[in-house]
Image (cartoon, rainbow, N blue to C red):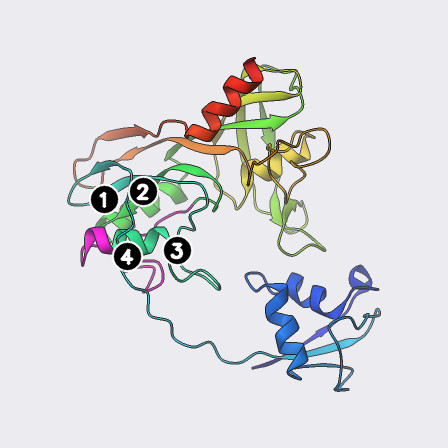
Amino acid sequence: MKQEFEVDEAFDGERLDKFLAQIYEGQSRSFFQKLIRAGGAEINHKTGVKNSTVLENGDLVTIDIPEARSVEICPEAIPLDILYEDDDLLIVNKPKGMVVHPSAGHYSGTLVNAVMYHCRDSLSGINGEIRPGIVHRIDKDTTGSLIVCKNDLAHVEIARQIKEHSVTRRYRGIVCGVVKDDSGTVHGDIGRHPTQRKKMAVNPKNGKPATTHYRVLERFEKYTYMEFQLETGRTHQIRVHMSSMGFPLLGDELYGGTGKNCAVKGLQGQTLHAMTIGFIHPSLHRYMEFSAPLPEYFETLLKKFRN
């Protein structure tokens, strides 16, 4: 499938492979490097371009991406940390490094592969074959509570509550820097970053309303242990809001949490944990709330900072 993009001044001087990786979210730079080497790209209708070809403002880039092949998603016997389960849903404690559902480059080892094995045929099908049972998600390196729906009725009801912002979602995180205010609220519309397509940003022009409430739990010499409560649930919301305040999540490479003044050796990904989730049960019609304990690496960091 061929698509054309006109290069604007924001990408003037950018390499071709890097430009395409930013335009297409979910595809890696190496994917486009292979495609370019195979002759799948043109600049101003000229062939023979290279990965390192530098773009100029006004250039017309044509890319020919092969049609996606159907990928079979298979159940896998991956252990699950289940906080609660009944006929309608289960609440799982997702570990660090696990992708929630299959995507480009991640077709096995995901939470979906694990719940397909655990639940067999008892999963909602509203989100299709790639995301059975998945009504919301958290980032790969964020740990904690996640709802998985076993039937469509439960899925519709939980999705409605999420849309209405009535689901309780409290997170724990460690940020770089010492936050002075004991509590507060961040309001900032979140949308795609204007030039770095893999990032989100506070963007009043094309963002959607986003609100994060925060509370300081403990202060250390260079870090702050905090609780966050989401009023909305935008992509990367806590990570973006805290970075916009100058306090990125510790370990968050994408949003500035691995700089010289806040790096911790051996830490991979943001220090963020979806601790508590609460909702009206779709069949029992009463409020239920579940909390996932802090992961071991998180507890170890807290002990280290306290000493």
Q: Pointer 3: residues within 10 angstroms few (<14), some, or many (20+)?
A: many
Find disc 2 in the rendering and name its residue: 147
Find disc 4 in the rendering and name its residue: 76
Q: Earlier in the sequence, mark 3 or mark 1?
A: 1
Q: What secondary structure is found at the residue carrying circle 1?
A: strand
Determine if the magenta segment contains residue 136. Answer: yes
User: Mark 4 against mark 1, which lies toward the viewer?
Assistant: 4
User: Mark 4 against mark 2, which lies toward the viewer?
Assistant: 4
Closer to us: 156 or 259: 259
Q: Earlier in the sequence, mark 3 or mark 2?
A: 3
Q: What is the spatial separation of the Cα atoms under label 3 and label 4, in whole angstroms?
A: 13 Å
Please indicate, yes or no, whether residue 75 appears anywhere in the rendered image.
yes
Find disc 1 in the rendering and name its residue: 89
Q: What secondary structure is found at the residue carrying circle 3?
A: loop
User: Mark 3 against mark 4, which lies toward the viewer?
Assistant: 4
> Along the horizontal axis of the image, is 229 left or right of 125?
right
Q: Is residue 225 above or below residue 267?
A: above
Asked whether the beta carbons under mark 3 and mark 1 sit within 8 Å of each other, the answer is no
Query: x, y (%) of residue 305?
Result: 57, 18
Q: Label 2 sits on what residue type?
A: Ile
Asked whether the beta carbons under mark 4 and mark 2 sit within 8 Å of each other, the answer is no
Q: Is residue 32 above or below residue 193?
A: below
Asked whether the beta carbons under mark 2 and mark 1 sit within 8 Å of each other, the answer is yes
> Along the horizontal axis of the image, is 172 left or right of 57?
left
Determine if the magenta segment contains residue 49. Answer: no
Q: Label 3 sits on what residue type?
A: His
Find disc 3 in the rendering and name its residue: 101
> Along the horizontal axis of the image, is 3 left or right of 132?
right
Closer to us: 240 or 78: 78
- What numbered label is drawn on residue 15? none
Q: Earlier in the sequence, mark 4 or mark 2?
A: 4
